[in-house]
Amino acid sequence: MTKRILCDVPMNRVEGDLEVRIEVKDGRVADAWSAGTLYRGFENLMRGRGALDGLVMTPRICGICSTTHLTAAARALDAIAGLTPPDNALRVRNVALMAEHAQSDVRQSVLMFMADFANAAHGGEPLFDEAVRRYRPGAGSSAVETLSATRSLLEVVGILGGQWPHSSFMVPGGVAFAPSSSSVLQCLHLVRGYRAWYERFVLGCSLERWAAVDSRAALDAWLDEAPAQRDGEVGFLLRFGRAIGLDAVGRGHEAFLSYGSFDLPAQTAVAAPNGQLVAAGAAQGTMVAPFDPARIAEDVSHAWYRESASRHPAQGATDPYASAHTGRAYSWVKAPRYDGRAMETGPLAEAVIGGRPLFADIVAAGETSALARQLARLVRPATLFPAMETWLEELLANPGAPIVAGDGRQVPDGEGAGLLQAARGALGHWVRIEDGRIARYQVITPTAWNGSPRDAQGVRGAWEEAVVGTHVADPAHPIEAGYVVRSFDPCLVCAVH
Ligand code: NFE
């Protein structure tokens, strides 16, 4: 007889309030519902405020990705004012945001994802004792070292932006102040130190050696090549993750989205196609198409908002209505869709859309999984350090160059959008200014894409879909489903903003 069980996935160590309910049938997840259980209302708080207030208020949407929200807010105002930030402003903005990403990528991997490797449910694994030594929350050697080493990158944001989190150092057309040469030197020292730590502790090899890992076969060869590589954080993630089957769960829709990120200065030694270090695109598997922001719409058919047709965020509304929809609604997270499709966003999406050979090979082989997603997150900083160092060196070589176009204070009436890649994926702010005040402010965050509820067609959100099919050994403790959701790094305060 088929046994159906409804249970909740344990979702501690998550920013904000998330409930994931699964239906387990014959030992596998048959269906899933993801709920953001808190309403926040930032979009409505913004209406009627001064045109510049998004720069101060929206970084408060989140304590872990505040520099991202500041950048989106500033880019929306750049667009409305028709201003292109000068090269030094782009360098400062980019380096601060990359520093926030590169600490978050390692913290989330070690402190949030790999922390579960020390769960007693894995007691029978040959590597379990080592997992406990490394990842026991608050005490494991990797946990303690990661917490301490990642602080140095937050100092970089503090130096360039005045504080972390919740800094407001970006203005329309640039940044509010130029770091002194000694401040830039200090940042360069911190970034180089962190990169050396990352190579030794996380990769167990140089960035150059890692960059040569361009296929699944090359990854296996790399893992066997040297003890430092096998024993680094990436090596342990792969070995323990494979041992507990994380390479066989969490596939999802395999529809990937990136808005693109990190505009290149006009004069720079950093090379990348289409003027951005991280490419924009929308992909089904490895078939990548150009990204068109006009194709974004938010569906609220299963969210606690007053029912309306799907709307582009430039026409969006946030009208909370918890008793609506004859009981269909189950989340405060809206359901963003691209061309009507539920998309996954984040470092794996960036890697596939950017054509990084290792991840293109994994996805093309049908091996999209929780492990592949988490691997993409943990190795993303390797793609950021060279450009961070180059842009800091270029800041040193160009002291006194302009840091703002215009006066940094005036924003005309009009509308515009600020789109970029946050640590967890595609983030957009859509802003309309009328009579010098904010008339509309709509935000779509990475976790709204990844953690959305169903849409009017009944299509599940990205991690709802990814969790279906996951083998669950003990429905009372569905830790396997937890890994799948956690590989997206849920941030519910961002999702419900
Ligand atoms: Ni609150 Fe955020 C999300 C990221 S949006 S962590 O989702 O990354 O910028």
Image (cartoon, rainbow, N blue to C red):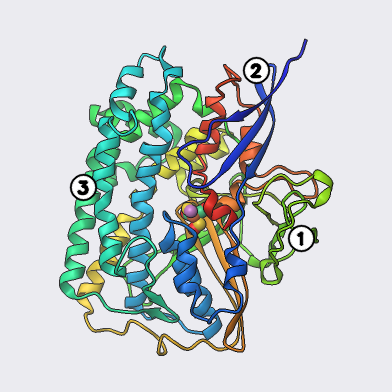
Label 3 and label 2: CA atoms lie apart by 44 Å
- The mark lying in front, picked from 1 and 3, is 1
Crowd band around label 1 with a 10 angstrom C-alpha radius: few (<14), some (14–19), many (20+): many
Q: Is residue 317 above or below residue 497?
A: below
Q: Which residue is depicted at the point 33% across and 50% down?
A: 103
Q: Earlier in the sequence, mark 1 or mark 3?
A: 3
Q: Could you tell whether 469 is left or right of 396 in the image? A: right
Secondary structure at numbered mark 3: helix
Residues tagged 3 and 2 counted as in contact (Cβ below 8 A): no
Image height of 168 relative to 41, above or below? below
Is residue 353 at all visible to an observer of this figure?
Answer: no
Q: Position of residue 136 (x, y in %)?
A: 33, 28
Separation of residues labelled 1 and 2 (CA atoms):
36 Å
| Pointer 1 with pointer 2, Cβ within 8 A | no
Residue that appears at 34% across and 32% down: 137
Q: What residue would you read off at disc 1?
A: 310
Q: Amino acid at mark 2?
A: Gly
Number of numbered markers = 3
Q: Amino acid at mark 3?
A: Ala
From the image, tell me which residue sits under label 2. 27
Circle number at residue 196: 3
Say which element carries label 2. Answer: loop
Q: Residue 75, can we see it?
A: yes
Q: Earlier in the sequence, mark 3 or mark 2?
A: 2
